Amino acid sequence: MFMSIAGLGLPMGLIMVLSGRVRYRNELDTFLRLVSAYCISIILYWVIGYGIYSGDTIHGMVGANGGILNRLDLMQAEPDLYLLVLFAIPPIAAAAAMVERGRYQVGNLLVAAVAVLVAPVTAHWSKHSGIDGEGWLFAHGFKDIGGLVVIFLSAGFVALAVSIVLGTRLGRFPMQVGRPRGHSPTWYGMGVILIVTSTIILSAMQAESIEAMSTAFYVMLIGVSFSAVSGSLLPLLFRRSETTQTVSTSVLAGTVALTAVASFAEPADAALIGMLSGAFSVGFNHILETIEVDDPGELISAFLSGGFVGGLMAPLAWSGTSASLASEFVTQLVGICAIAGWSFCVTLLVALLLKITIGLRVSETDEKRGLSISHFGFSSEPDFIISRVMHFSDQPQHAEGERNSALTALAANFSSSIVKLHEETSKASERILSTSSDPKKGAAMVARIRLAEDSVRVKAEDILMLLEDILKTGEGGDLGSERFRQWGQEAVDKLLSPVENDIKKLARHIPLQADLSELENIIITAAEILSQGVHQIELMRDLEEAQVEGFFSRDHICDFALLLHEKSRRIKAVAEVRNRPVQIDCAVTKGLTVNGDANAFSRILLLTVEGALNRQLSDGVKPVRIELKEHSSGQYVILDCLDTGTALSARQIRAIRDPLSEDRALDELGLGQILPLILVSQLVRAMGGEFAISSEHQAGTHLRCRFRKRQKKIQKSPRKAA
């Protein structure tokens, strides 16, 4: 009983892991979402799930559920509490796959369907045995001592199906980039430790004696240690920098895999299974990133790799009397495929049904604002700002590999200015409530100010996370030469310093503002300033990542004409917001195919238009013209952009073609104006294209990108027989 209660740390650890891997603006929503999933799974297990799992079998497929009246005596014994913990894992995995972008109430409906249709059914197949019959997998010899592999394997495929239907988080894969990351490595690490400890306890309790429990503990620790070593060495061999994430994922995968054999395996078998599961987790994680499937917390790769390796390798450690080891492997493989197929297909169908009928994902606006305030009206406190101040202030100024002490100090000063703005805004809100002649109007004004301030916090958090990415990248030392890193540091300084100065001015102006109605405008202005700063710093981050050799994938196929047709509405909307005309010309709506990542080509289109609109400084100019056409030779696809805005100087053109050629007096270069075009030139070259730009006074600016067209293979008809 004690060990079953200790096993409750397993779902609690999952909650901690996910809460530590989301932004502050989504932390409350993530916590309540997972707790709600846990509660729903408990209720439905009591009402329905127990009968489906343990009821009289119907052809070995499902148990006959006698109804809630037969559940009144449930949870009075240790096995029931044990199953109560296990059956909650797939519903929690479904909720975990929806963090930061899924609707709360609709997500609970999906969790309820998973709680009824997945774990009870698959567990009945693999565990049920009685006078009424056996589950069909159990009858064929499928082995899973304790049932943990079945549960975790189901949870992995449930989360995979939900993530595929829901899509990726905003900014997760702009061009195969690893953002966004969570805010609390401490919570994440403690959650991993809690999951591992609780899973080891649940596995050890399946032993038949105290001595066997000690052996199971020892075997689990040996195997988990080897999985951690495997997850540490593989990234080093392939020269990847995500060591911390891969180690934690490998540890979870090894823990899951060893649950199937802990009661009877030898230490050598546990070491082998641990190494294989750790290696498989790294591979699964890389595959999910390559096909751009969002995996919050890396739980999908851990559950899939651990469940697959543990289930498949169980016969190797099993001391049974089967005549053929090969037949046991086939039985395990069939069981794994059946469990995986059922879990994935059922979840996929339910998720698609909810997506089509009700809607499964929140709006883009709510996702950017954060789900805590969208679902619960909770605005994140500025703890993240204070923690960033401490983080950047405590950075060693002399450490080897440090990006630059000046950039670190800039981040700390920016954090301080945001904290000062928050303090002055809080004082202003109190002043409005105490001095307003109409309490209702005063309360409404304060509510609007706090809403605007929440936008300020969100944008400030984005800037600080991007700066942290740049600092971390600099420490890795794999983005180009030292000269480029120095140029990038100075460029970030020039872009962020005006934002910091404007925020400080607004913070000083708040106490002096006598007109209370103007306070709201000040906060809105601060949010707009920060929004522009976020965009520019993000462009710098993308520019740095463009220096990575092989960063952009060219093995994809993109229909450039179809992409332009899809993005035309957004391009026109952006131009309309700026009150500037734009003209898009393309003779065809599809058929201009090129090799490369569609995300990169989309960025090329949008940044080209943005760079042209940045120079439209006066009224009465001609529309910005975007033209996509096929070259007369039929070998190339040409993208032209013509505008009659302010002409570019010769120095700016040199900087666009080669940023490092102009590394002096960047503040005089108009970096914010030409930064989109600098990134366009890098993206075009990364995609194997050619970039050209020219600009003359009163004639305008002409930008041309040329890509090699993908040629269709001509299939020769077979020659007729004589």
Image: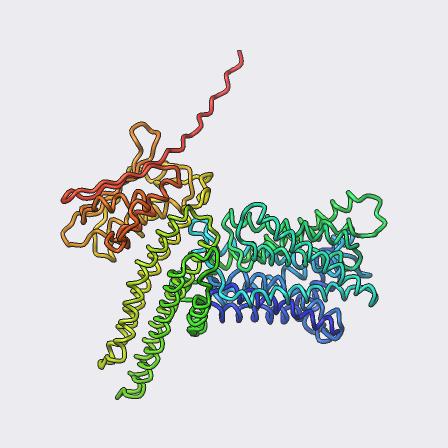
Decide which of 506, 296 is in the foreground and name it.
Answer: 506
Q: Can you give x and y, in whole percent of width and height, for residue 322 in the image?
A: 83, 47
In the image, is residue 1 above or below residue 581?
A: below
Image-based side of 230 in relation to 567, left or right: right
Residue closest to the far front: 398
Decide which of 319, 398 is in the foreground and name it.
Answer: 398
Decide which of 56, 257 is in the foreground and name it.
Answer: 257
- Residue drawn at x 36%, y 47% is 602
In the image, is residue 619 above or below residue 395?
A: above
Q: Can you give x and y, in whole percent of width and height, for residue 353 in the image?
A: 51, 57
Image-based side of 555 in relation to 587, left or right: right
Residue 230 appears in view: yes
- Residue drawn at x 79%, y 44% is 325
Residue 170 appears in view: no
Residue 365 falls in image quadrant: bottom left
- Looking at the image, how many numbered discs can be counted on the residues? 0
- Residue drawn at x 51%, y 15% is 720
Residue 709 falls in image quadrant: top left
Q: Can you give x and y, in whole percent of width and height, for residue 485 in the image?
A: 39, 51
Position of the N terminus by quadrant: bottom right
Q: Can you give x and y, in whole percent of width and height, for residue 669 in the image?
A: 25, 52
Image-based side of 181 in relation to 323, left or right: left
Image-based side of 205 in relation to 546, left or right: right
